[in-house]
Image (cartoon, rainbow, N blue to C red):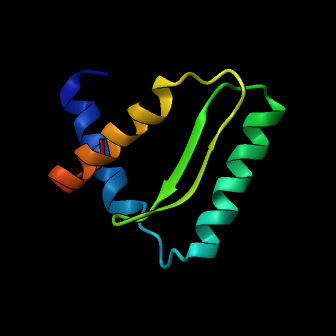
Amino acid sequence: MELDGQIEQVAGQERDLVLDHFTDDDAWDLGSWIRQRASAGHWPVVVDVRRFDRPLFFCALPGSTPDNPDWVRRKAATVQRFHRST
C-alpha cells in the first residue's frame, strides 16, 4: 500500500474507532489484558495506557530495554504536541 493509502486508512480508523467512554477502570482492564497477553507470549514490551493528561497503566515486561519507556514518553509527547495519532 502506498503512503497516501496508508494515511487515508489511518484517518479512517481515527474517524471510526472512537470509544463511547473510557474510564480509569477501563484503562486498567485494557492494560491488564495487554500485559497478560504479552506475558503469555513472552513479548518484551512496555504497556502504557493513558489519557491525554496522565498515565493510567504502565508496566515493563522482562526483556524490554531501558529505552522502551523513553520511547513511549516521546510518542505520547508527539501526540500531545500535534493532537493526532502517531
Relative image position of residue 83 (x, y in whole percent): 20, 57
Choose top left, top right, bottom left or bottom right for residue 2: top left
- The quadrant in which the N terminus is found is top left
Measuring 39% from the left and 31% from the top, which residue is drawn there? 71
- At 38% across and 61% down in the image, what residue appears? 16
Image: 2 above or below 26: above
The residue lying toward the viewer, choosing from 57 and 38, is 57
Check the image and name the residue furthest to the front: 66
Q: Is residue 41 above or below residue 86?
A: above
Please count the marks in the image.
Answer: 0
In this view, 8 is above or below 42: below
User: Camera-side residue: 73 or 17?
Assistant: 73
Quarter of the image that includes the C terminus: top left
Q: Identify the residue at image location x=78%, y=45%.
A: 36
Q: Give percent across and percent down for residue 35.
A: 71, 45
**Horizontal placement of 33 versus 64: left or right?**
right
In which image quadrant can residue 51 be found?
Answer: bottom left
Compared to residue 36, the image places residue 32 above or below, namely below
* Side of 54 relative to 2 (left or right): right
Q: Position of residue 67 (x, y in %)?
A: 46, 24
Write down the quadrant of residue 60 in the picture.
Answer: top right
Which residue appears at 33% of the width and 55% of the height? 14
Q: Nearer the viewer, residue 62 or 80?
A: 62
